Amino acid sequence: METETDVIVVGAGPTGLMLANELAAAGVGVTIADHRASRSPQSKAGNLHPRSCEILDQRRLLAPIAEHATARLPTGHFAGLPVPLDFSVLPTRHRYQLLVEQARVEEELEASLGRSGVAVDREHRLTALEQDSARVTATLDTPSGPRRVRCTYLVGCDGARSTVRELLGVAFPGLPGRTGMVAADVTLSRIPRGADERRRHIGARFRFGSRSAAMLHPLSGGTYRLLFPAPRQDVAKDAPVEPAEVREVLADVYGDEAELDRLLIASRFTDASRQAERYRVGRAFLAGDAAHIHLPTGGQGMNLGLQDAFALGWRLAAAVRGHASDHLLGSYETERHPVAARVLDNTRAQGELGRVTTAPMQAMRELFVELVRLPEANRHLAGMVSGIDIRYPAPDDRSAAHPLTGRRAPDLDLDTAEGPARLTRLLRPGRGLLVEFTVDEPHYGDAAQRWSDRVDHLVAAPVDPVDATALLIRPDGHIAWAVDSNENRGDTPDASLRQWFGTPESN
């Protein structure tokens, strides 16, 4: 069996589903294949940080996901320290993290994809891929026999043990795991005080016993997620987690406060951290856990993958339409590789702060508690963990770039000729946006007209002050160009329009 499509996405976790939604919404033909017969019953992740809430809201995906949230917390955490990271000071409308299970995120993303007419091809295992200068051919093992899919681009969103990454020959260097961990979903016949308080600061859930440590937090349906270092570190990663292992940790950390009722499902993982050397090989790309793995402390993993997908989707859509240069496709790796590297660094640091088995590490942890109480330090870590402070490098000399270039656009309230509007909602169609705040004297209408098939132009008055008189915003919400003075009319958006949106239909 042979089929053709524009893009094949391998892997139907959050990253793959988000990417497929982006492509389908842009009118790009997409096939999404996954080797599993159904979604995993255990959620590896359980939260959405502010930046992920922004991008989901930008695509009308946040509201249905938020209905499944068990809590909306105005805080985050770093290394489980008892001092919360204050998200309420962040420059976003979403000054919170949503506690929502990965399974529910996948459920809603798959439902959205279905409304676009795209179904996940399950029990489809990638076995080979070939590519030349014009196309990629993927071979899949399916219940009805081999299937060959010819496509323009292929994206591996197939997890830490990525087949795509292996077939591409991309190295995955990093640090091996030193500590084996367990994630167990349980019901309890005795519940520790405060464990079911859904708005409780996550860092306050970390408890230490004489031999172990654990974190317990509520899921939906009366179940709890228990995270802990495995009592025996010589156990194989694929070995089943036994109820006795869970009881041992509960007894050490919680004493008589907790008692196991049922062990529903459990998995093992480590604190290994690795990153793919390359995110692109020709017409094939990597995203999500296929591109990077790390300790899940801080709850950054699923968020990082969703944001990879958001960064890649509009680029691939532009390429399929013939509007993307090779530089645009290459900029996905240029921008996203450093973002993931920073997450690997901060999760490694958090992992070390969690090793409180020695007096020196306990002293280090206590010192960090003091530091995180400082507003400046707290704000820095909050911006990092939440994803709000991501700034992509300027494509040319950074020293010449406007301070807003590369940052996410603020979700401004605007007064337009059609009435009140919110900036990010104007980005919902997945197009670029050139917005001018000089209502009485706009300057860039002619430039916008040449790219009008892919970039919208708006003249509006911001309700609150903004440090620019015009912004060119990419479909992913990041600012490609900004100018802050009407007197500097020589600084036009033309070069940035060409760089990010391709050659105009008419020069």
Image (cartoon, rainbow, N blue to C red):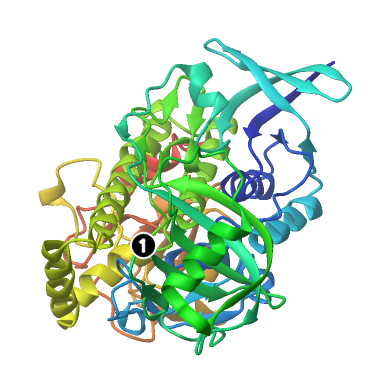
Q: Amino acid at mark 1?
A: Gly
* Image position of 500 (left or right of 469): right
Quadrant, the N terminus: top right
Name the residue carrying label 1. Answer: 387
Q: Position of residue 386 (x, y in %)?
A: 37, 67
Whether residue 203 sits left or right of residue 317 in the image: it is: left
Return the residue nearer the eye: 133 or 113: 113
Q: Quadrant of the C terminus?
A: top left
Residue at 41 percent of width and 21 percent of height: 170
Asked whether the viewer can see residue 426, the reply is no
The picture places residue 336, in percent across and down from the top left corner, at: 36, 43
280, above or below 381, in the image: above
Q: Nearer the viewer, residue 29 or 292?
A: 292
The quadrant where residue 409 appears: bottom left
Q: Residue at the right extreme?
A: 144
442 w.r.t. 397: above or below: below
Residue 442 location, x and y as percent? 35, 68
- The residue at the point 23 percent across, 46 percent down is 394
> How busy is the neighbourhood of tag 1: few (under 14 within 10 Å), some, or many (20 plus)?
many
Residue at 53 percent across and 75 percent down: it is 217
Residue depicted at x 50% and y 21%: 166
Residue 16 visible somewhere in the drawing:
yes
Q: Indicate the secondary structure of the residue bearing disc 1.
A: loop
Percent across and percent down for residue 194 are 50, 88
Figure disc tally: 1
Q: Name the quadrant containing residue 189.
A: bottom right
Q: Is residue 87 above or below residue 126?
A: below
